[in-house]
Image: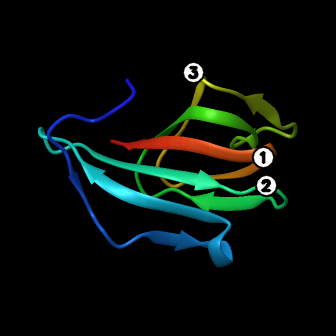
Amino acid sequence: MSQFEKATVIQKANVFFDGKCVSHTVYTENGEKKSVGVILPGVQLTFNTSTPETMDCVSGRCRAQLPGATEFKEFGPGEAFSVKAGEAFVIEAVDGPYHYVCHFS
């Protein structure tokens, strides 16, 4: 999907890690919450989840260390990973900005 139809976008950006990750919250017509954002390369960022999250790669590449893993795994366009509520994951953009859609459930 390249766009959200009939969605509400929150104008104020979510800015994390001194601007290394910036996103906007989106609510779909049926009430689903998502965020659309970009992670800039150069640093590893640790995110803690309060709800289950699925990260879909729109463009760019990332490396993520998922809960319980000792190794990082790389994800590119069309690929996704999921994290349960109450867990943390480490992510970094590889070779340029990582554009994503995060689905909350």
Circle 1: residue type: Gly
Q: Which numbered mark, 3 or 1, is in the foreground of this view? A: 1
Q: How far apart are marks 2 and 1 (CA)?
A: 6 Å
**Residue 77 shown left or right of residue 70 in the figure:** left
Tags 2 and 1 in contact by the CB under 8 Å rule?
yes
72 or 13, which is in the foreground? 13
Quadrant into which the C terminus falls: top left
Query: Which residue lies under the disc numbered 3?
Result: 78
Q: What element carries label 1?
A: strand
Tags 3 and 1 in contact by the CB under 8 Å rule?
no
Q: Which residue is drawn at 33% across and 33% down?
A: 3
Task: Return the disc, 2 or 3, that comes first in the chain's sequence.
Answer: 2
Q: Is residue 87 visible?
A: no
Q: Where is residue 15 in the image (x, y as percent from the top left)?
A: 53, 72
Count numbered badges in the picture. 3
Q: Residue at x 71, y 57 (%)?
A: 40
Task: Locate residue 76: give its quadrant.
Answer: top right
Q: What element carries label 2?
A: loop
Circle 3: residue type: Gly
Query: Which residue lies under the disc numbered 2?
Result: 41
Tell me: residue 68, above or below residue 1. Answer: below
Q: Distance between the residues labelled 3 and 1?
A: 17 Å
